[in-house]
Amino acid sequence: MRFRRTITALAAGLLALLGLAACGGDDGDEIAGVGQRATAAMAGPDGTPMGTVTLEQGPHGVLVSADVSGLTPGGHGFHIHTVGTCTPDFSAAGGHYAPGEHGHGYMDPDGLHAGDLPNIYAASDGTARADYFTPLVTLADGADTTVFDSDGSTIIIHAKPDTYASEAGAGDRAACGVIERS
């Protein structure tokens, strides 16, 4: 009889713990950074404002939304870069954000950089609006794939469309914006 009560008590405790874990609660959202937002104020090489890119942490990754202007019509490479500075020139932003050191491009058999995003396309008036989702980065502090590492990150828009191949081929950097919490 005593053994049966011990097993019943253990089973009840286990069920209670499983129930709490399944509920998740706000603590899980807070740890994952869900709801955190960041923005990058985009500017051209001469400092001309070119719009904004907004990042919002969701439960499964980050929604990246671009609302930019001043681009040449057509496709443009669109990436997260490794360093949170655009000055003295856009080369200061470093290469594509690549924790884990995967290859470049959607078509690379070794995988893609976490900072590789699909091209954006500017209309004949130079405006572009795009929404992309990426599970490869986070806004959460302390995570291995956070864009808020020790030197920050930027958004870069290139002059040409990305080839998505293993060698980056999107041309010059046409716009840059430092990602900052909002």
Image: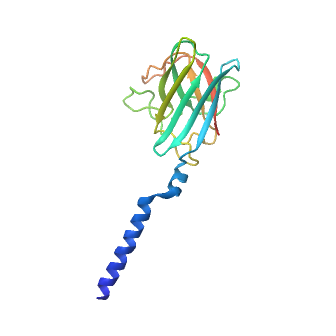
Residue under the image location 47 percent in, 34 percent down: 133
Percent x, y for residue 134?
Answer: 47, 36
Q: Is residue 14 above or below residue 23?
A: below
How was this image coloured? Answer: rainbow
Quadrant including the C terminus = top right
Residue under the image location 58 percent in, 25 percent down: 67
Quadrant including the N terminus = bottom left
Percent x, y for residue 82?
Answer: 58, 33
Q: Is residue 7 above or below residue 15?
A: below
Percent x, y for residue 122?
Answer: 53, 17
In the image, taking residue 97 as reference, residue 20 lies left or right, namely: left
Residue under the image location 39 percent in, 27 percent down: 108
**Most foreground residue, 2 or 68:** 68
**Most foreground residue, 159 or 15:** 15
Percent x, y for residue 165?
Answer: 42, 22
In the picture, residue 81 is in which quadrant?
Answer: top right
In the image, taking residue 35 as reference, residue 177 lies left or right, namely: right
In the picture, residue 102 is in which quadrant?
Answer: top left
